[in-house]
Amino acid sequence: MDPIVATFIEENIVPNFNYWIYVILMMIGLYAMITKNNLIKKLIGMAIFQTAIILFYVSVGVKDTAGIPIISHHGSEHHQMAGLSSEAGSTKEIHNKIDKDKYANPLPHVLMLTAIVVGVSTLGLALAISQKIYKSFGTLEEDEILNELRPGGHD
Amino acid sequence: MIWQFDIIILIFLVIAAIISLRLKDLLGASMVFGIYSFLICLLWAEMGAVDVAFTEAAVGAGVSTVIMIATVFSTKRRSKD
Amino acid sequence: MKIFGLIAVLVVGALLLSATSDFPDWRDKDSPANKSPVSSFYIEKTEKLTKVPNMVTAVLADYRGYDTMFETVVIFIAGIGIIAVLRNFDGPYSSSIRRENNDEGSGLLARITCSLILPFIQIFALYVVAHGHHSPGGGFQGGVMLGASYILLALAFGLSKAKGYFSERRTMIFAAVGIFIYAGWGVLCLLFGKEFLNYSVLDSLLPGDVEMARSHSMLIVEIGVAFTVTAIMFSMYSNLSTRGRLNKGL
């Protein structure tokens, strides 16, 4: 292969391979929302678009040596419910030594939790509206609905 | 953390998304959408986002797929494209 | 028409792909998102200030409590919106519950499996809500699991049996009570003198010191979120599968 093309691929695609897949997923969802005729297929495209964006955001917070964002103290019983003050002195030292590189970034996770739940709410409401459209027009295909709505149809 | 796993799951994601949009039977399309949600949940669990993976497994592969199948049963099952 | 869609998608895709060359390397611990002072503060100080090991739950319920409250309101509005879109309000019956219910659910195998597994699902859902401070979980995950357990009951035994446990009036009361708990807890913080949803003033009311007051308050608001999410998940299913009439299930 041409060495220029090989270096282009080596430098631009291989380290960012996953970003390319995210963009491809987003474009698949966008294409489905624009061109598909069936309303349910449009909704599936919308859901694919949403989850691809959420996937991109969550992957921003990944660190190479990091584990899950839950601090665990192996074997130390520090979470006494009454808050004994004698425990507080010894556990403060453990708390001060939290290594930032060992925990994944929790902020994108929090924002994307909200996004997932808002996505399912939107999907539920959109499915309800499409059921109502089916009851009114008898079909779920976009071109037949537009034919009915134009002057010359019965609506 | 394991890049081979990441690449395999990402390629399966793209395949599942394309199949879900090409099936003419809407019940099958909803099921493949459930597969897509489950694969994304696996990817997030591997990346270390366990809360997000938990929510996506419960919401995406659970409730979202069920309400889509409920709608498909109430309306037409076959689509023209 | 399809050609225009394809051209638009290709143009936007090319723009986004050319922007990916500027992104930091994946899994880079020195990327701007990972080095920001906000994330560093959340990772290093959460355990000390709130005594909650799960950083995501702490940020969700305490540091970003406003967002979570309005997210719960969004779910509630979606549930009400589905009823408003699908319900036929000007028929001879104004309440849809008085129609006859004649569905038997699924077959014998599904009924037996469901009755064996359902109590464990519900107990696990309550565990996920209560243990959200130490393990992955929290209000949303537990609430969705609890709502899904009622959906399983409706699928296996018929919608009328699930409605016996979770009638429409009870569902809506649950949903409203959940938001009332969350917002009411914030107003309680107002009554004690400081800002809305500032849990640290409640240490005179709750057992323990200031950090434990924040931890207990997080549990209370997560319970409120779980109430609303449970009720609305079941209400969404029962309305969407019966086209708003709630007489016969899937």
Image (cartoon, coloured by chain):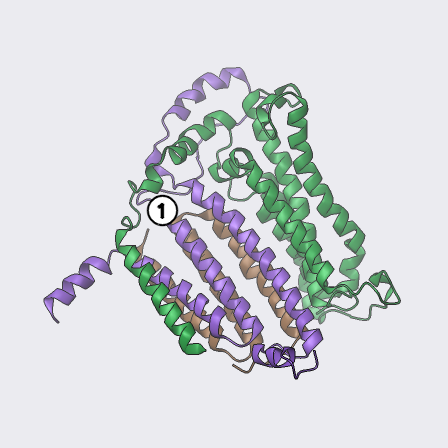
Does residue C91 appear in this view? Answer: yes
Q: Chain C takes which shade in the image?
A: green
Question: Looking at this view, is C9 or C99 the one in front?
Answer: C9
Question: Looking at this view, is C230 or B74 the one in front?
Answer: B74
- Residue shown at 82%/71% (left/top)? C102
Q: Quadrant of the C terminus of chain A?
A: bottom right
- Residue shown at 66%/37% (left/top)? C182
Q: Please, what secondary structure does the residue beneath circle 1 have? A: loop
Does residue A78 appear in this view? Answer: no
Q: The brown chain is which one?
A: B
Identify which amino acid the numbered label 1 is placed on: Val
Question: Looking at this view, is C148 or C74 the one in front?
Answer: C74
Percent position of residue A30, x then y: 45, 66
Q: Residues within 10 Å of mark 1 (few under 14, many from 20)?
A: many
Which quadrant of the figure has residue C43? top left
B34 shown above or below C51: below
C198 shown above or below A145: above
**Residue reaching furthest to the right:** C92
Q: Name the residue under label 1.
A: A62
